[in-house]
Amino acid sequence: MNEPVAYPPQPGTPWMPPSPATRSRAYRVWAQVLLWAPVALTMIGVALGAGLLAVADADPTYGSAAYGYLGLMAWGILFVLSPVLLGSFIAGLVMVNRARR
């Protein structure tokens, strides 16, 4: 009754080395897209809004006020979409981290 019980070896022990998790090329590409797309969209939106506000401020005529409103709308859209952009950025960071492991 005192015989040792033979259990299968645990993963990570010298008998069974852990198998590395390989990530496909498509996974790595999507990780980069999800990481850098929000950065690019944010930079474009901020530059567009600032440029439109600068154009509206440079010309004091009646017709250039619309540029200022468009600049404020660009920043408003960025404000509304910021949770989506942040979520995409964080997901991209997690995916890049997993792909590098």
Image (spheres, grey):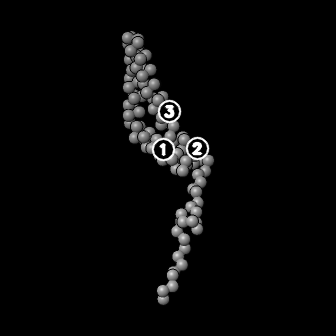
Q: Are marks 1 and 3 in contact (CB under 8 Å)?
A: no
Q: Judge the density around disc 1: few (<14), some (14-19), many (≥20) Cα neighbours within 10 Å.
A: some
Query: Mark 1 to mark 3: distance in Å?
Result: 15 Å
Q: Nearer the viewer, mark 1 or mark 2?
A: 1
Image position of 5 with respect to 34: above or below: below
In x, y percent, where is residue 24? 61, 50
- Is residue 24 shown left or right of residue 53? right
Earlier in the chain: of badge 3 and badge 2, it is 2
Image position of 7 with respect to 43: above or below: below
Q: Amino acid at mark 3?
A: Ala
Q: Are marks 3 and 2 in contact (CB under 8 Å)?
A: no
Q: Secondary structure at mark 2?
A: helix
In x, y percent, where is residue 44? 48, 28
Please give the label number shown on residue 93.
1
Earlier in the chain: of badge 1 and badge 2, it is 2
Please give the label number shown on residue 40.
3
Write the residue at 47% across / 37% down.
38
Q: Nearer the viewer, residue 74 or 12?
A: 12
Write the residue at 54% across / 78% down.
6
In x, y percent, where is residue 3? 51, 85
Q: Are marks 1 and 2 in contact (CB under 8 Å)?
A: no
- Is residue 88 shown left or right of residue 100? left
Disc 2 target residue = 29
Q: Judge the density around disc 3: few (<14), some (14-19), many (≥20) Cα neighbours within 10 Å.
A: few
